[in-house]
Image (cartoon, helix red, strand yellow):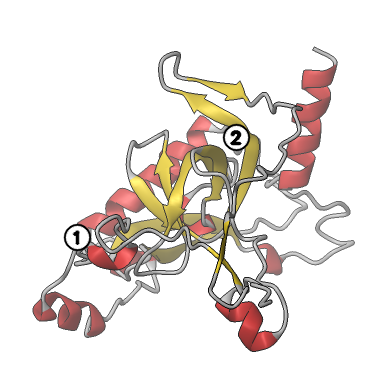
Amino acid sequence: MVLTVYFYAFEAYSGRKPGVKHLNVLGSLCYAHIPSQQRQKLDLTSKRCIFLGYGSCEKGYRLYSLETGKIIVSRDVVFNEDAYWDWNTQKERSVKIPTAEITASKHSNPEVQGEEGEIFGTSTEPSDQERMPSSQDFDHTPRKYKSIAEIYEKCNMCIIEPESFEEAAKNDSWKKAMEDEILLINKNNTWELVNRPSDKQIIGVKWVYKTKLNLDGSVQKNKAQLVANGYSQKPGIDFNETFAPVARLDTVRTLVALAAQRN
């Protein structure tokens, strides 16, 4: 009598069963992380998506973004397998898991007796004609590609940021960035005009210029910031207290949570 024992190829080679922790339920809701380069400080850190599968040419999860309607690939994903997306109502629904137990069928693996009393398990593997198409049967040609001239252009691109106001004023893009900074300062009521004190040292201001880049290295925008020359004042003589004009994100989230709790 020959006993038929089934092993995975990985298990037969390594002596341990393969892990399945990386497998997730297809069609379940998930949340893909948004990199800090693609969002502002107070923006959402993730976007809601639907899990479609795994990347065929790249390492990551293939997701359908409910915000943009596009298919994206992301590695940093949090799954919610207890919920799914209802396309009819365009709302999130919870999954009701049945509690009925699943019992194995007695006739799941019929046995065939050979001439010498050997017992073999019949194979249930599909034939070549019934084989399901694998991921290797499809064309994996990238949808987007760039010419060699575009690649050389970005590799040889040299970004020069202005060092002074006079240098930045000669460029229309930097002039627009400074105008946007002044409008933002006035909109946020950053300062108020007061009488100039005679016994205090007045500090000056300067412009700081920075070029923001996209993930592919192309220029996203030019940003100009108007900062105070705080180094010209001495603590205990010109001032006794300090003030941070930018709030910490943890503080903002705590205040929002308390406001929502207390209505």
When the figure is inspected, residue 106 is found, relative to residue 129, above or below; the finding is above
Label 1 crowd (10 A; few <14 / some 14-19 / many >=20): few
Examine the rendered structure and indicate whether residue 114 appears above or below residue 66: below
- Contact check, label 1 and label 2, Cβ < 8 Å: no
Tell me, for residue 261, which label it has, or none: none
In front here: 149 or 221? 149
Q: Return the residue nearer the eye: 255 or 176.
A: 255
Q: Is mark 2 on a helix, strand or loop?
A: loop
Label 1: which residue?
A: 143
Foreground disc of the pair 1, 2? 1
- Residue at the image position 64 percent from the left and 62 percent from the top: 20
Q: In which quarter of the image is residue 99?
A: top right
Q: In which quarter of the image is the C terminus?
A: top right
Q: To which residue does mark 2 refer? A: 193
Amino acid at circle 2: Leu
Give the x, y percent position of residue 156. Answer: 22, 85
Residue at 83% across, 25% down: 258
Quarter of the figure with residue 88: top left
Q: Nearer the viewer, residue 24 or 150?
A: 24
- Compared across the picture, whether 47 is left or right of 58 comes to right
Q: Residue at x 69, y 69 (%)?
A: 231
Q: Where is residue 131 in the image (x, y as percent from the top left)?
A: 31, 59
